[in-house]
Amino acid sequence: LPLLAFAISGSHALIPGSMAADADEVISLPGWDDALPSRHFSGYLSASDTKHLHYYFVQSENNPATDPVVFWFNGGPGCSSLDGFF
């Protein structure tokens, strides 16, 4: 839970429209030729000077201002959390 609180309050990377988020925006994906149906962001959150956590954020396709945010955590050694996400 402390890590989750850090991720929410300690980074502007999760706030679309901030300079950090704009730099992390994903504008295309391999094998997807059309425009993405929502905004995607990929980057790192700094947990310390030497530890960085990767995030992949997909903005709601409905109403990003009012829809809830879902955090997907799974994986572990040798398994990416993206396996479960996709």
Image (tube, rainbow, N blue to C red):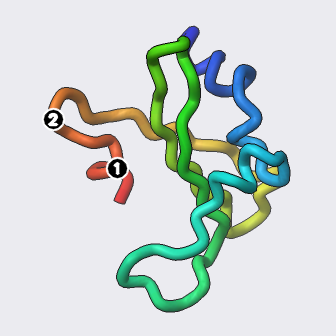
Residue at point 65%, 43% (across, down)? 69
Residue 55 vs 58, above or below: the answer is above
Q: How many neighbours does mark 2 have within 10 angstroms: few (below 14), some (14-19), or many (20 or more)?
A: few
Report x, y in % for residue 16.
Answer: 78, 51
Using the image as rendered, state which of residue 64 and residue 10 is in the foreground: 10
Report x, y in % for residue 53.
Answer: 47, 29
**Amino acid type, label 1:** Leu
User: Left or right of 32: which side holds 27?
Assistant: right
User: Left or right of 15: which side holds 26?
Assistant: left
Residue 5 vs 34, above or below: the answer is above
Residue at point 74%, 44% (across, down)? 20
In the image as oriented, which residue stretches furthest toward the bottom?
Answer: 33
Q: Quadrant of the N terminus?
A: top right
**Amino acid type, label 2:** Gly
Using the image as rendered, state which of residue 75 and residue 11 is in the foreground: 11
| SS state under label 2 | loop
Residue at point 71%, 29% (across, down)? 11
Residue at point 70%, 40% (across, down)? 13
Q: CA distance from mark 2 to mark 1?
A: 12 Å
Report x, y in % for residue 36.
Answer: 58, 78
In the image as oriented, which residue stretches furthest toward the left?
Answer: 78
* The label number, if any, that marks residue 78 in the structure image: 2
Number of numbered tags placed on the structure image:
2
Q: Quadrant of the C terminus?
A: bottom left
Residue 55 vs 25, above or below: the answer is above
* The label number, if any, that marks residue 82 in the structure image: 1
